Image (spheres, rainbow, N blue to C red):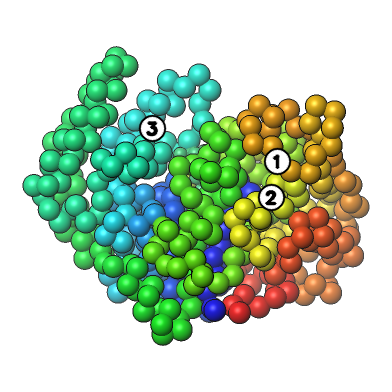
Amino acid sequence: MSNVVVVGAQWGDEGKGRIVDWLAEKADIVVRYNGGHNAGHTLVVDGRTYKLALLPSGVVRGKLGLIGNGVALDPEALLAEIDRMAAMGIRVTPEVLQIAETATLVLPVHRAIDAAQERMRAKPLGTTLRGIGPAYEDKVGRRGLRVCDLAEPELLAQKLDVLLEHHNAWLRGSGQEPFPRDPMLNDLLAMAPRILPFVGRVWEQLDHAHSSGKRVVFEGSQAVMLDVDWGSYPYVTSSSTIAAGAASGAGIAPSHLGRVLGVSKVYATRVGEGPFTSELDGALGDELRERGGEYGVNTGRPRRCGWLDTVQLRQSCKVAGINQLALTKLDVLDGFESVQLCVGYMLDGARIDYMPSTNAEQQRLQPVLRRFDGWVGSTRGVRSYGDLPPQAAALIDAIQNEVGVPVAMVTTGPERDDAIVLQPPFA
Ligand code: IMP
């Protein structure tokens, strides 16, 4: 079995893009299976920074990229990203990108509804305002438009009417202007000739890849704690971010997925609202944010920062099927006098070792912290475990022991090869 699923093991922004890029060099195909352009995957290749949102990270290396049916695809955002890549010298053609016919379309009305819903919530969720949630709502509400609909202009118009009837009833009912159909329809029809050449049977590509022994990387977006089932609901995204989501969101048997590599920083960050037990509010949090460059790739939002939560990470590994860990950004902890790990929670005076399900309980958790000595000197660019300061090695060992999942690699800088590889990526 030579496939790898890459899953964010915290709240997103763990550095999955660069891990996928590293794996992509050794793989044949990279597949996106969930989320949309709410994701932000940063890669640094030969000193150039590429910021991807919808395109599978392998496109930068000319690997075949597939966008599965589980993705929410904004055609405008996709074309803009393809144009941005072209300006950087990366040509995205139908030879290197295929999109599932059945992927859900994100439309301008979804962006408008996303913003309106956030405005009307007593406690906003802090969404990326990209329209992702409303597009998935339409999908499961069975009124969504799909990529294949772009090929049928008359049906497209009819389906758009049905979709707008639903949304405009809500907009009118909440005292807002209804959303007009024609500009949206015209834009979709204008974009269709550029999108349709990319459309194909992704499931079939994956079937061929499997029978011919090709190596596939499944590139998860967001993370376990933002999963619609397993995250801190309702402060989650609207898709299945875990390894099981790769099977249903791309069209492949779960038994063909291979290894599941969970990516986690050696500390923790979260954007948007929601519980974050090990969050650091004061100067230490600010220092982590500045040292780690913790600002959203696409939105520029400052990220909330805190210590690594090994209880959250252990539980995430179990529910997401993670059987190897990639720890990222070790070098960001260089120079801290001490470093802490959250190794348990106190809930109403009792110690627990799991993340409770209700939001109210999650908000009441107090972290049980374990202190580690920091280290003098730099881990930046270190590529061998033996070259790490003993305190940094001890921290990695402690994370592995608390979580109970082997650490396959540790990254020590932004360049692709700034990494310590402890276990080879493909079986
Ligand atoms: P939505 O996906 O835009 O609906 O946002 C829902 C929640 O997921 C918000 O808290 C977002 O900040 C978060 N989110 C969505 N995509 C990402 C991502 O790629 N990285 C980190 N957080 C994300």
CB of residue at label 3: within 8 Å of ligand 1? yes
Quadrant (top left, top right, bottom left, bottom right) of the C terminus: bottom right
Three-letter amino acid code at the position of disc 1? Met
**Extreme residue in the bottom direction:** 212
Q: Who comes first in sequence, dot 1 or dot 2?
A: 2
Residue, disc 2: 315
Q: Position of residue 325 (x, y in %)?
A: 68, 63
Q: Is residue 225 left or right of residue 67?
A: right
**Residue visible at 59% across and 65% down in the picture:** 260
Residue, disc 3: 114
Of the residues tagged 3 and 2, which is closer to the observer?
2
* 169 w.r.t. 243: above or below: above
* 176 w.r.t. 163: above or below: above
Work out how far the residue at label 1 is from the one at label 2, CA to CA, in angstroms: 7 Å
Work out how far the residue at label 3 is from the one at label 1, CA to CA, in angstroms: 29 Å
Q: Say few, some or many: other residues with alpha carbon within 10 Å of mark 2 (under 14 / 14 to 19 / 20 or more).
A: many
Q: Who comes first in sequence, dot 3 or dot 1?
A: 3
**Residue visible at 25% across and 18% down in the picture:** 172
